[in-house]
Amino acid sequence: MDGKDLDFVPTGHLLRELQTRMDSMVFVGSSNRSSKEDSVLFAVTGALHSCLGLLEAGKLMVLSQGGDDDNDNDNDSIID
């Protein structure tokens, strides 16, 4: 990213960069813009069966973390 502050890099550009580094990738993100507006972002790279497998693996990882549905910060994690 050439030393740029990532806060000023559009999310779409960040995702395109990640897509170049991954054979398969699925990203789904939600941003609550206001009390009346939400933004959902989706990006996918790879073969259909690989992406479906990633979605299932992600689902299992989220479920294994447990946590309280009312607290958005309990499940923040990056697993690599």
Image (tube, rainbow, N blue to C red):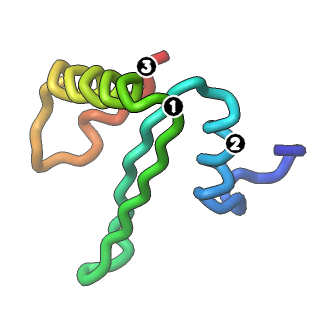
Residue beneath label 3, please?
A: 79
For the residue pair 49 and 56, the one nearer the viewer reads as 49
Q: Amino acid at mark 2?
A: Glu
Q: Is residue 21 left or right of residue 48?
A: right
Is 28 in front, or is 44?
Answer: 44
x and y, in percent, of residue 4 in the image: 83, 51
Q: Quadrant of the N terminus?
A: top right
Residue 64 percent coordinates (x, y): 17, 19
Say few, some or many: other residues with alpha carbon within 10 Å of mark 3 (under 14 / 14 to 19 / 20 or more).
few
The foreground one among 4 and 56 is: 56
Label 2 with label 3: CB-CB less than 8 Å = no
- Asked if residue 15 is positioned above or below residue 21 in the image, the reply reads below
Element class at badge 3:
loop
Q: Nearer the viewer, residue 3 or 25?
A: 25
Of mark 3 and mark 1, the one earlier in the sequence is: 1
What residue is disc 1 on?
Answer: 46
Q: Judging from the image, what secondary structure is the residue with disc 2 in?
A: helix
Q: From the viewer's perspective, is residue 14 above or below residue 47?
A: below
In the drawing, what numbered circle is on residue 3?
Answer: none
- Label 1 SS: loop
Q: Indicate the amino acid at tag 1.
A: Gly
Q: Quadrant of residue 51?
A: top left
Report how far apart the C-alphas of labels 3 and 1 lie in the structure: 20 Å
Q: Residue at x 31, y 79 (%)?
A: 37
- Asked if marks 3 and 1 touch (Cβ < 8 Å), the reply is no
Q: Which mark is residue 17?
A: 2
Identify which amino acid the numbered label 3 is placed on. Answer: Ile
Label 1 crowd (10 A; few <14 / some 14-19 / many >=20): some
Task: Give me the C-alpha separation between circle 1 and circle 2.
Answer: 14 Å
Indicate the quadrant where residue 79 lies.
top left
> Quarter-wise, where is residue 59 in the image?
top left
Q: Residue at x 24, y 25 (%)?
A: 56
